[in-house]
Image (spheres, rainbow, N blue to C red):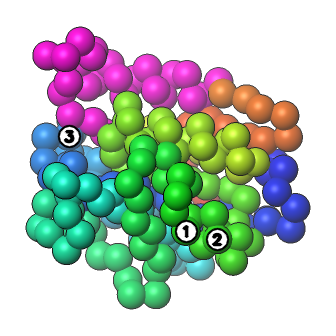
Amino acid sequence: MTTLPDRPNTALLVVDVQTKVMANGAGRDAVVANIGRLVAAARAAGTPVVWVQHISDELPKGSEAGAIVAELDPRPDEPLVEKAYGDAFEDTSLEAVLAGRGVGRLIVAGAQTDACIRSTLHGALARGYDAILVKDAHTTEDLSQWGAPPPEQVIAHTNLYWRFQTAPGRTAGTVATADVEFGG
C-alpha cells in the first residue's frame, strides 16, 4: 500500500515507447502489442494512462525519432510528461500529474529496461509509490558490445529483482500483461 496519503488510485505509466528507442528493442512487436493491451484495459477501467517521452539531442521534441510508436495512440486528454533524465520524476511534471489524479500506485511499462524503466521504478518507490513492473511489457536494445548482458538477460534479471523488491509501507513486484488489474 502506498505511503502517499489520499492517493488510492492507480495509473498506467508508459515510459519512452518512442520510435528510435523501440527500433532495436528485444521482442519489440510483442512488447508494443502488450502495451497496447494495457492501454486499452486501463482506458476501459477508467484508469489514467500517463505517457512519458524522453527529449534529447537524439530524440528531439517533435521529431519522428522521438515520437510515440505508430501502433500506440496517446489521446489528447492523457498527460504526456517530457523528461531529460532516466527517472521520469526528475525535473518533470510527473509528480504533479499523479497527485492531481490521486495516484499512489503505478503500473509501469516501456523502455529501456536497464535505464529509464529501472530508474523510474526506483524513483517511484523512493517517493512513496507502489510500483509494479509489467514483466512482458518492457524492453531494451542489445548493449552487449559495451559489456551489458544480452537484452533477454537484462529483461529477465530486472523482472527477477523487481519481483522481490520491498520498501516499508509500499508494494513492488511484477505482473504479466494478462494478469494486470486496473481500478480507480
Residue 23, compared with residue 94, is above or below; it is above
Earlier-in-chain disc, 1 versus 3: 3
Say if residue 19 shows up in the picture: no
Residue in the picture at 46% in, 26% down: 158
Query: Percent from the top left, x then y, of residue 179?
Result: 54, 49
Residue that numbered label 3 is attached to: 25
Residue in the picture at 19% in, 74% down: 62
Classify 10 Å Cα crowding around label 2: few (below 14), some (14-19), many (20 and above).
few
Residue 134, compared with residue 35, is above or below; it is above
Query: Percent from the top left, x then y, of residue 114?
Result: 37, 31
Residue 29, compared with residue 41, is above or below; it is above
- Callout 3, which amino acid? Gly
| 150 in magenta | yes
The answer to whether the residues at label 2 and label 1 have Cβ atoms under 8 Å apart is yes
Question: Which of the two discs, 1 and 3, sits closer to the camera?
Answer: 1
Q: Locate residue 60: give its quadrant.
A: bottom left
Classify 10 Å Cα crowding around label 3: few (below 14), some (14-19), many (20 and above).
many
Residue that numbered label 2 is attached to: 96
Left or right: where 103 falls relative to 7:
left
Disc 1, SS: loop
Left or right: where 93 falls relative to 38:
right
Q: Locate residue 116: give its quadrant.
A: top left
Residue that numbered label 1 is attached to: 93
Query: The C terminus lies in which quarter of the figure?
Result: bottom right
Residue in the picture at 63% in, 63% down: 95
Earlier-in-chain disc, 2 versus 3: 3
Query: Percent from the top left, x then y, of residue 144?
Result: 19, 17
Disc 3, SS: loop
Question: Which of the two discs, 2 and 3, sits closer to the camera?
Answer: 2
Span highlighted in magenta in the image: 137-164
Q: CA distance from mark 1 to mark 3?
A: 27 Å
